[in-house]
Image (cartoon, rainbow, N blue to C red):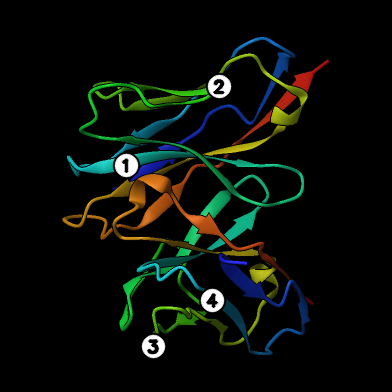
Amino acid sequence: NAGVTQTPKFQVLKTGQSMTLQCAQDMNHEYMSWYRQDPGMGLRLIHYSVGAGITDQGEVPNGYNVSRSTTEDFPLRLLSAAPSQTSVYFCASSSGTGLKRGYTFGSGTRLTVV
Amino acid sequence: AQKITQTQPGMFVQEKEAVTLDCTYDTSDPSYGLFWYKQPSSGEMIFLIYQGSYDQQNATEGRYSLNFQKARKSANLVISASQLGDSAMYFCAMREGPNTGGFKTIFGAGTRLFVKA
């Protein structure tokens, strides 16, 4: 099915571990973003990209890295996991010519850092 | 600075009645887009409606309409004839243009809507 695919769906990490959350879309969308969702705080933008090779920081980038080597993939790396990074992470994509349609979201990754 | 404010943490509405969810925004960019998303208890994010800053008319999509008051910087979502399936979290979002925000989209804290039978 076409859309945004996030893996894994669930993950438990120990403090200090690193990992990569995967995000892939097959709609040839230029724009991709990573958000984290915490209770009472809505979705906060971590990093975003307007095309392959171009990334920029969002509202809460500390502790996270991204790269965009292809149009399809936009992985999010946690460098050294902390309990404060326990959250639900969403990846989203949008066509540059279809911004009126809003983002297509992945199903989310629920991350727990212990 | 780009900012979205949703002041209603929770709202109750009787089935078949209309409800308005509030959203105010702040931006210095004359070109921006406003969005509403729905998040049911299943956790998925569903795009509902879009309003462009230069659009002269309020956006409508079925039972959803966006009450856009540019001078007040408000973009309230109106849901007509509420249904039990409308019970969900609703998020307002804003995307600025290339001159300021680089097309990044930020979200408000959300409003949880409860529809009563």
Residue named by callout 2? B63
Residue type highlighted by circle 4: Ala
Residue A107 lies left or right of residue A71; in this view the side is right
Check disc 2 and report its element: helix, strand or loop. Answer: loop
Label placed on residue B33: 1
Query: How crowded is the residue under tag 1: few (<14 C-alpha within 10 Å), some, or many (20+)?
Result: many
Query: How crowded is the residue under tag 4: few (<14 C-alpha within 10 Å), some, or many (20+)?
Result: many
Same chain check for tags 2 and 3: no
Residue named by callout 3? A69
Residue type highlighted by circle 1: Gly
Front one among A113 and B11: B11
Residue named by callout 4? A24
Question: Mark 3 or mark 4, which has the lower sequence index?
Answer: 4
Cα–Cα span, label 4 and label 1: 25 Å
Indicate which label's residue lies in the foreground, 1 or 2.
2
Residue at 43% of width from left, 49% of height from top?
A: A102
Cα–Cα span, label 3 and label 4: 12 Å
| Circles 4, 1 touching at the beta carbon (< 8 Å) | no
Residue type highlighted by circle 3: Ser
Cα–Cα span, label 1 and label 2: 20 Å
Same chain check for tags 3 and 1: no
Cα–Cα span, label 4 and label 2: 32 Å
Question: Mark 1 or mark 2, which has the lower sequence index?
Answer: 1
